[in-house]
Image (tube, coloured by chain):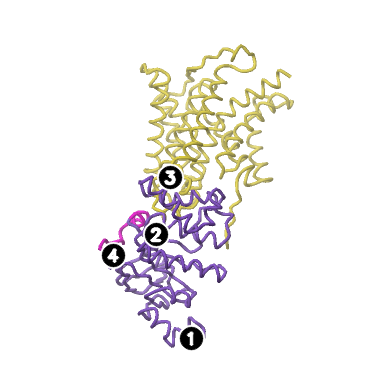
Chain colours: A purple, B yellow
Amino acid sequence: MLLNVKDLRAYYGQVQALHGLDFQLHQGSLTTLLGANGAGKTTTLRAICNMVRSTGSIEFDGAPLTSRSTENIVRLGIAHVPQGRGTFTTMTVEENLQLGAISRSDKAGIVSDIERMYAHFPVLKERHAQQAGTLSGGEQQMLAVARALMLRPRLMLLDEPSFGLAPLIVRDLFGILGKINREDKVTILVVEQNAQLALELADKAYVIETGRIVMAGPAKEIATNEDVRKSYLGY
Amino acid sequence: MELFTNQILAGIATGAIYACMALAVVMIYQAIDHLNFAQGEMAMFSTFISWQLMQWGVPYWGAFVLTLAIAFAGGIAIERLLFKPLAKAPILTNVAGFIALFSIINSCAGLIWDFTIKQYPTPFGSSPFLGSQLISTHQAGMIGVTILLLIGLFIFFQYTRIGLAMRAAASLPESARLVGINTSWMIALGWGMAAAIGSIAGMLIAPVVFLEPNMMGGVLIYGFAAAVLGGLTSPFGAVVGGFLVGIFENLAGTYIPGVGNELKLPIALALIITVLVVKPAGLFGRHIVKRV
């Protein structure tokens, strides 16, 4: 088991956003966390990286995360692509990629990984010297994924990667995520509102409602569940 | 015409000092979003330390380098002890912190070295530069050291990983933490560097304004004017602003009747207000748009 979350509760000031979440991510799995706006999906990801006040236990490969700072959690190999992508807009595309690897010290590996990212995402190579803020939304999302991969993460957390992107680009992006999961053996947890696509991609799914997990199971089963179909797939 | 060229060159020389102070101010502003009112006093104290080292027999450049190191460590210590605990405090608490720091350093310098004016040596001499009457060797040295400093800083921020990390931490702290950057130490490092840059400004201007605890008061106001003119979010702008303010100050003092030396400082303040009214982000600063 790569990530084991038990009784996770999170708070924004006095407001409790998560009410005791339990979930596990297995090594090499691709899991999706579904839910409506305000259900607590983003908060869950932020709690894993200790960016919101929380209680409960989170273990990454046996190591407790709750008392670590965000940057130390990242350095364990957890890459977080935040909502809004977190692009360093005033820096170049290549500098963004270098920042993704800033906690690594293997210079040759970083150089070859940048080339690998350019192979994954040819558009980033074309724009490597351009200010990242001038990229389109889809390109910025590619950059955010590439920046996260530069960490050589063992676990990648993605917060609504499809947000604001055209459907075709979302398909592309999800295809790449699947490939990263299969080929690079990166465990992925993706939070999505685009339930249909996320369920096609994932092997396991959790559904979260007002800070509680209300359903869990293989993605295929969840996709055929009557309630999920009505509430999240809309048919 | 010669008077004009002379004033421009003299302006560039003092402008170099304002550029250093503005750069120090901007570095801390970028890191913590506050203006360091004590920047001048930190520079003054460092200058006293270098003077003390020279009194003890350390040669000029030895004292110069040692002072840089001491100022760097001192800047980090001030951040860790005073401003890290205030990181989440309201703006007025921070302002109070800066004012406290200002008067503590000022009084300590007076206590240790008293308030009498002291001569401060220049390693460049003060003969005419290259036989020209336009500029002295010390003024040329001020410009030269500043340019070397700027080139060094440019290389540091543009081509080193730690420089890249510092830029990232200043521009988007949350994203920076998400790639594993310890933003808190980047802020401390920014303080250390700002203190070291300020100490260079202090040591270069001390032969001109003489060494005493209040020597940096006027210089810091010009530094603020330069930073505001160039844009508080742009280190490049701060440097350009510094040179512009230096030139402006000299030309105004020479050519605008009735300004003279006495009214130079109000001119810097008028410049700050004018820029804030006409172009609040400064010449090179970026407007920060917040989503609501």
**What percent of the width, then of the height, locates residue A215?**
37, 81
**Where's the C terminus of chain B, which quadrant?**
bottom right
- Tell me: residue A45, above or below residue B58: below
Of the pair B32 and A194, the residue shown nearer to us: A194
- Tell me: residue B101, above or below residue A52: above
Q: Mark 2 — residue? A: A79
As helix, strand or loop, the secondary structure at mark 3 comes to: helix
Residue B86 falls inside the magenta stretch:
no
Task: Say which amino acid is labelled 1.
Answer: Lys
Task: Say which amino acid is labelled 4.
Answer: Glu
Find residue A59 and name its label.
4
**What percent of the width, then of the height, locates residue B190?**
44, 41
Point out the tag, 1 or 4, that comes first from the N-terminus: 4
Q: Residues within 10 Å of mark 4 (few under 14, many from 20)?
A: some
- Same chain for the residues at labels 1 and 2, yes or no? yes
* Cα separation between marks 1 and 4: 34 Å
Residue A65 falls inside the magenta stretch:
yes
* Cα separation between marks 3 and 4: 30 Å
**What percent of the width, then of the height, locates residue B251?**
69, 26
- Same chain for the residues at labels 1 and 4, yes or no? yes
As helix, strand or loop, the secondary structure at mark 2 comes to: strand
Task: Say which amino acid is labelled 2.
Answer: Ala
* 1 vs 3, front mark: 1
Give the residues drawn in magenta, as a range: A56-75
Looking at the rendering, which quadrant does residue B228 occupy? top right
Q: Please state if A223 lies on the left or on the right of B279 as rendered.
A: left
* Cα separation between marks 4 and 2: 15 Å
Point out the tag, 1 or 2, that comes first from the N-terminus: 2
Find residue B187 and name its label.
3
